[in-house]
Amino acid sequence: MHVYAKMDEYVADYPKGVVVLLVIVVSQAIKNVEKLILQSIIRSLYLLKICSNVVFLISLSNDF
């Protein structure tokens, strides 16, 4: 609770426009990070799929 009171005092020193701008910037940054994380997960899943296909092909060729 004390932290929030401190934050309110801190925010009160700034004009509202600056606070809104900061909030927008931070939320955009979070969205970008989420997008990057999703992309990296998709990429790693894709790589996993390729690797499993390669392993499958190798095991097939060993059967002959």
Image: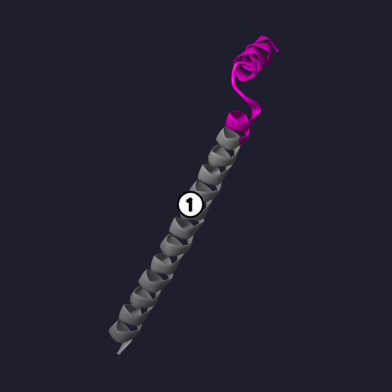
The rendered magenta stretch, by its main secondary structure, is classed as helix
User: Which quadrant of the figure contains the N terminus?
Assistant: top right
In the image, residue 18 lies at what x, y percent? 58, 30
Q: Can you name the residue that lies furthest to the right here?
A: 1
Q: Secondary structure at mark 1?
A: helix
Q: Position of residue 2 (x, y in %)?
A: 67, 9
In the rendered image of this protein, does residue 41 appear above or below residue 51? above
Residue drawn where x is 50% and y is 50% of the image: 32
The residue to which callout 1 is attached is 37
Between 43 and 21, the one lying in front of the other is 21
Residue visible at 48% across and 52% down? Answer: 37
Answer left or right for 55 relative to 1.
Answer: left
Magenta segment boundaries in residue numbering: 1-20
As drawn, which residue projects farthest toward the bottom? 64
Q: Quadrant of the C terminus?
A: bottom left
Circle 1: residue type = Ile
